């Protein structure tokens, strides 16, 4: 597995792959890799001739009071996992490689989709995501790019600007990977104490209760959200940031679930903010 | 010459060219083609296997009180000129092809370079330019793209976001083409009455006076700008919008011309706003 540290290195790698007529798969990550990421790598490996993973904690998508500095960085361990997953190259630039002096261009998705859910609490977050993902797609020459459903709003935003800017890449959404007890895999799970980790099981439990009601015919958005809220309220360590149920992928409001919908939640467990979601599929 | 009307048509054309291993040159225009545009086509024709011209009056780069509706549209005549210049395909979409319902992504160059010169009078103009040019580069798969020096600030902005977003395209700047009397070719020249057209010669005359002073050793920015202003003041029909002399390509302020510099002017002749520029090359 090659490690590409700079923009010229990934450009040379991409040009060689393109000249050889190979299809390129990209999996953008911020490192601290877990089984969720590795599932993305496997999906890329199965579909593409060449797989490039990026490991880059992108400063532009963090707010001034967010956890950029303390975001976990575990590059040596990440490389072992990537190599085991059959990744061909990992792109691991410094912030100054991606945002050199004089840098001033940003990709702005201006629709409602960036102001809801995580965007409401994190102004500028999706501007950072859209900018870095555009750069990574261009640098890698990706034909296929892979994102996890766990960040479902991110997938919606990425698909939106890829279509709007006519980027020649196909965006794949890969289902959430969970720990055996049900907690969605996340790089931030390592912040949780054992007691908090048990408390965090309430997230998926609340979503499953709503899905059970949905499967039994409940279509009222308010009632489905209330089922989630009621279950989350049973856990003293859980503080709700949001519980939202919107049309998917438009994220438009949906009083009645008569089309595919995203039930998404963000909950603080202690100091750690966790997100989870399920997609309710209208038949 | 093929005429490509829709996004799927240009995508299919681009993919066929790429599959055949051909290099692609793109010349984005708003139509109303004149000899300046055709010079861009010839530069592309000389360097690339396949030449795609676009003819699209981009609504996003016009302000609410600008001349979008009355901007000249002469597509049949444009096609004759493009075919004669050896262009392989012209992309001529409708606004709804480029900005369909739900469209909401914009490329924003946030540096000082967009607020100076034409950007000062035209807020949002370069956001529209950056967005449409990004789309056209992605749609065409261009290896090389061609822009005229007449819109020198546009070239600076395009080079900036191409570098920032790591777009895999090389931006070529082609010198200004002038009418025999010296007026820079422009689609807006057709708005000028005969008397205005004579008056408009003052633009290049003022720039030549400054260049003569520069060639004689004048390096003081204020004095060079005053030479231009004094000459423009000799023409009663001319109303100055700006006279600016900045470092090129950074567009940073430059009290003394000790590096390459752009002397750029915008002048209203009657109701028609004209721009012109020269580059002063420090040895």
Image (tube, coloured by chain):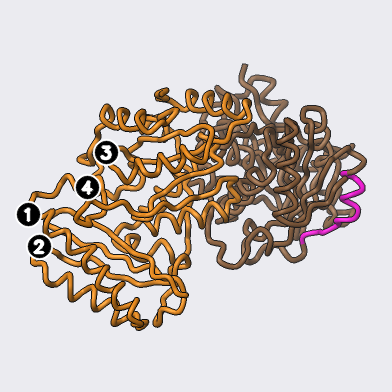
Chain colours: A orange, B brown
Choose the circle earlier in sequence order: 3 or 4. 3
Q: Mark 4 sits on what residue?
A: A188
SS class, disc 3: loop
Chain for numbered disc 1? A
Q: Disc 4 or 2, which lies upstream in sequence?
A: 4
Residue situated in front as seen by the camera: A86 or B26 = A86
The answer for how far apart the CA atoms under marks 1 and 4 are is 15 Å
Specify whether disc 2 shares its chain with disc 3. Answer: yes
Q: Nearer the viewer, mark 1 or mark 4?
A: 1
Q: Which residues are magenta?
A: B71-82
Q: On the rendered image, what quadrant is the N terminus of chain A found in?
A: top left
- Viewer-nearest residue: B117 or A98: A98
Q: Is residue B222 visible?
A: no
State left or right for residue A221 relative to residue A11. Answer: left
Q: Nearer the viewer, residue A46 or A273?
A: A46
Q: Main secondary structure of the magenta part?
A: helix
Label 4: element kind: helix
Q: Dot 1 corresponds to which residue?
A: A195
In three-dimensional space, the C-alpha distance between marks 3 and 4, rounded to whole angstroms, equals: 9 Å
Marks 1 & 2, CB-CB < 8 Å contact: yes
Report if the CB atoms under discs 2 and 3 are less than 8 Å apart. no
Q: Element under label 1?
A: helix
The residue that label 2 is drawn on is: A237
Q: Are marks 1 and 2 on the same chain?
A: yes
What's the residue at 65%, 43% (across, down)? B137
Q: CA distance from mark 1 to mark 2?
A: 9 Å
Report x, y in % for residue A68. 25, 42
Which residue position holds label 3?
A32
Of label 1 and label 2, which has the lower sequence position?
1
Point out residue A166 in the picture as x, y percentages from the top left corner: 60, 50
């Amino acid at each position: 597995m090659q490690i590409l540290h700079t923009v010229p290195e990934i450009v040379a790698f991409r040009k060689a792959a393109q000249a050889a007529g190979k299809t390129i798969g990209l999996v953008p990550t911020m490192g601290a890799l877990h089984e969720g990421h590795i599932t993305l790598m496997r999906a890329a490996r199965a579909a593409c001739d060449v797989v490039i993973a990026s490991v880059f904690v992108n400063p532009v998508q963090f707010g001034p009071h967010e956890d950029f500095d303390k975001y976990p960085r575990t590059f040596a361990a990440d490389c072992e996992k990537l190599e085991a997953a059959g990744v061909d190259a990992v792109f691991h630039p410094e912030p100054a490689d991606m945002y050199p002096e004089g840098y001033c261009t940003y990709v702005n998705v201006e629709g409602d989709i960036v102001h809801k859910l995580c965007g409401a609490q994190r102004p500028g977050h999706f501007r950072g995501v859209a900018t870095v993902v555009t750069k990574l797609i261009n640098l890698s020459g990706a034909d296929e790019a892979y994102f996890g459903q766990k960040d479902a709003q991110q997938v919606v935003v990425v698909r939106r600007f890829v279509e709007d800017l006519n980027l020649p890449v196909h965006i794949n959404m890969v289902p959430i990977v969970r720990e055996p007890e049900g907690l969605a895999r996340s790089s931030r799970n390592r912040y949780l104490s054992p007691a908090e980790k048990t408390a965090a099981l309430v997230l998926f439990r609340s979503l499953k209760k709503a899905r059970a009601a949905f499967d039994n015919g409940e279509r009222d958005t308010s009632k489905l959200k209330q089922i989630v809220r009621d279950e989350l309220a049973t856990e003293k360590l859980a503080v709700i940031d949001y519980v939202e149920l919107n049309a998917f992928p438009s994220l438009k409001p949906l009083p009645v679930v008569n089309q595919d919908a995203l039930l998404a939640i963000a909950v603080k467990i202690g100091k750690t903010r966790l997100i989870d979601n399920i997609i309710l599929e209208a038949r």
